[in-house]
Amino acid sequence: MDPEIRKDQLKEMFLPLVDALGYKLSLDEELVEFLFDQEVQIEKEKGSPFCPCQALTDEREHDMKLVCPCIPFHREHYDAMRRCWCGLYVHKDVDDPDSLPQISLKEFEASKK
Ligand code: SF4
């Protein structure tokens, strides 16, 4: 399939899901296009649009939690950053996605103690 068509299909599928979770696409259009290009490529190679920014382990239970949009599996962490790990999606009220820090899971877990 034409990668551009697949990219549009993925957006159409994912946007209602992230909208229901309180997220929207980043305003950084270049980043959005880049990440969707990556997801189309990953889906072609691995069968699912896994996260372009997080390492797979080949352990199914782990990896299936990294199929985009992976927000439901990492909700607390991403909500604290107001963005998903890649920054493809941000909270709906975010106007300046570049201002949002990426907080490692380790730092996030430590901040809760
Ligand atoms: S971190 Fe963002 S881009 Fe990566 S899989 Fe999760 S929702 Fe998709």
Image (cartoon, rainbow, N blue to C red):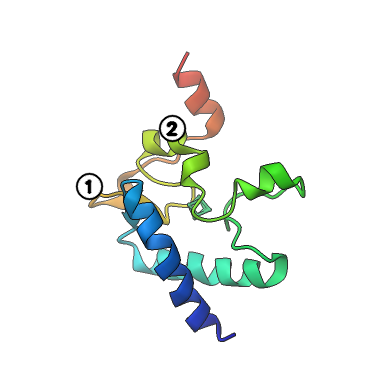
Q: Position of residue 43 (x, y in %)?
A: 63, 68
* Picture quadrant of residue 42: bottom right
Residue on which the image places disc 2: 76
The disc at residue 85 is none
Q: Give the spatial CA distance, label 2 vs label 1.
A: 17 Å
Residue placed at 45% from the left, 37% from the top?
75
Residue placed at 68% from the left, 42% from the top?
62
Q: Position of residue 38 (x, y in %)?
A: 57, 68
Q: Position of residue 105 (x, y in %)?
A: 54, 32
Return the residue found at the far top: 113
Q: Answer above or below: position of 10 versus 56.
A: below
Residue on which the image places disc 1: 93
Does any atom of ligand 1 lie closer than 8 Å to the CB of label 2? no
Residue placed at 26% from the left, 49% from the top?
92
Q: Secondary structure at mark 2?
A: helix
Horizontal side, residue 98 vs residue 85: left or right: left
